[in-house]
Amino acid sequence: MEIVYIDEREDVQKKTFAKWINSQLVKSNCSVIHDLFVDLQDGTRLLALLEILTGKQYKREKGRMRVHHLNNVNRALQVLEQNNVKLVNISSNDIVDGNPKLTLGLVWSIILHWQVHYHLKDLMSELQQTNLEKTLLAWCRQNTQNYSGVDVRNFTTSWSDGLAFNALLHHFRPDLFDFANVTRRHPNARLEHAFRIAQEQFGIEKLLDPEDVNTSVPDKKSVMMYVMCLFQSLPHSSLEVTSLDFLQSDTSSSLASPLPEGVLGEAEARTSRPVSLATNASVELGGYQVAMEEVLTWLLEAEDRLSQDLLLAEADLETIKEHFHSHEGFLLELSGHQEGVGAVLEEGARMLSEGGLNRDEEDEVRVQMRLLNSRWEALRLKAMEKQASIHGLLMGAQQKQLESLREWLTATEDRISRMSQTGPDLSDLHSQLATHCELQQDLQCQQKTVDALCNLVVVVDDNAADNMYSAMEDQLAALGERWEHICQWTEERGTLLQQLTSTASHLHDQVTWLQNWLQSKETVLKQMEAEPATEMGVILDRIKQLQILRQQMDAQQKRLVNIQEAAQELSTRMSPPGGGGDLEKIEALQDRWDALVMIMEM
């Protein structure tokens, strides 16, 4: 059974986290973000944010290709790792793809680290920072306990009516407003009043909107973030903070063991709780057993899914990618259940430490806790091992795809080196055009492989991240240049062949027509030679025919000259230059023309 947390609202977090980032970006006059999931995809503003938070400069790539965005985001993830910000199952692909949950998780980790471990390090001890939620909650309760209608028990419903925010502000600056007057206002007005006072008097950005808080269950992380800003800005002494009473727990969001090492042993070593509290033990034990059963049931299902989802080493790239993304989802689900597993183990440790259980019940709880903790750790390690295995297969398959494309490019370059000739005859041009069409079809088939390069999943080892990305980028750039050159050559040659074929075809038609015309006139003259005229009427008739033929030949003389000029120009555009058989036919036409003129003159 999946544990659903209703205290997180993606839409509110998206807006609140964007406001927090913008409050940092404006410090260096950087362009603000409008859509959190879209504007962080290229990694440039993520690096700009980290430059402001760390005070350092980071190189970024300005290209618009996916590989440039991946490189920028990976550089940001490396910076976070160098600053001990723990991220689990958040890859550069998730941010570049605009994954909502993982993008929010990334920003929340950044807020926690720099808002707590940096800004609040002088106010909180290291242990208090680790237990941030309970520390803040205790601080809020301490400073609002005497205010009517204010009972801070969580970071959700306790803040929805706006009284808690105003009570905190009034506790430290009672001179600013009348609290009793605020209580008579509408909840939205109370919230607006608190956010305005915090902004005007303490310089706290208005990160929350009243309508987002005044709901049945406000977003927990958004409220916590704003309270952190209040904690940082309101005047208080370090003595006051260090005197807070809180419970020890691990609130890390990383995918690790739900409880710190030694929790089970410490719980067993503590004394029993007073007998006066033992009356509720059976009720608590029953609820604990139900929660334990639900978590163990989910663990068993997860183990089965992990064991059944097998991937063969010889699988094709698309299948490996599907497994990769599927397993990333499984890891995300695993991370989401970590808090539920930790809550069950915490509850068991609390029951053991407070007492009220008999020996058999205590032994049963200890056995269950050890079983849950060990199976969780085993599942986590197995999931990580499978992730590493899929990563290896994926990188190998993608490298194989790159090698295959490289070989195809080499073969195609060799192929086009033998296709430089154009012409010289029309039949040759038709053959060359057909061969060129085959090349274009091959390019279209290969286009799918080239397009797939834009969706490469790059998995980088932490020890060689820069080298890996640099090598991958160099390969993609080199192959991309060769592909562009082949495509450009193919397009230009295709255009040239089409033009030459069209011109040669038209010229061929002109030559054929003129050949037929000459042949018909040659036939007429031969008939005149074969049948000499003796009668005056016939002689006059033939003289008239010859005069008409002379006029026709004068008219066709220009056609012949145009054909010769067009053929000469076409021959210069051939590679190598030359007219071939078509030019010889045109030279033969000139010979026939001269012979016909001689016959007429005789």
Image (cartoon, helix red, strand yellow):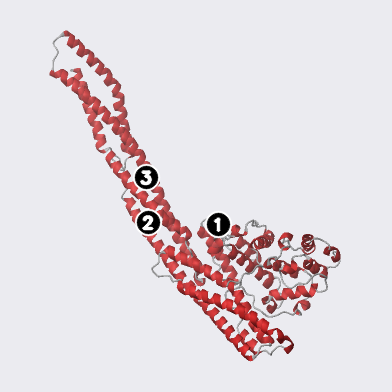
Residue depicted at 59% across the width and 74% down the height = 338
The answer to which of 88 and 433 lies nearer the viewer is: 88
> Label 2 crowding class (10 Å Cα cut-off): few <14, some 14-19, many 20+?
some
Which numbered disc, 1 or 2, marks the residue that appears first in the sequence?
1
Question: Tag 3: Cα neighbours inside 10 Å, few (<14), some, or many (≥20)?
Answer: some
Give left or right: position of 53 versus 412: right
Left of 525 or right of it: where is 71?
A: right
- Is 529 rendered above or below residue 421? above
Q: CA distance from mark 2 to mark 3?
A: 18 Å
Q: Is residue 147 visible?
A: yes
Whichever of labels 3 and 1 marks the residue nearer the N terminus, that label is 1
Q: Residue furthest top?
A: 536
Question: What secondary structure is marked by label 2?
Answer: helix
Mark 1 sits on what residue?
Answer: 62
Q: Secondary structure at mark 1?
A: loop
Whether residue 133 sits left or right of residue 439 in the image: it is right
The picture quadrant where one finds residue 288 is bottom right
Whole-percent x, y for residue 583 in the image: 26, 35
Amino acid at dot 2: Leu
Q: How far is mark 3 from mark 1, CA to CA? A: 33 Å
Q: Can residue 398 be seen from the camera position used here?
A: no
Using the numbered discs, state the Cα–Cα distance from disc 1 to disc 2 in whole angstroms: 28 Å
At label 1, counting other C-alpha atoms closer than 10 Å, the crowd grade (few under 14, some 14-19, many 20 or more) is few
Residue 286 position, x and y percent, is 64, 81
Q: Amino acid at mark 1?
A: Lys
Residue receiving disc 3: 493
Q: Which mark is residue 409?
A: 2
Q: Hey, what amino acid is under mark 3?
A: Arg
The residue located at (38%, 42%) in the rendering is: 495
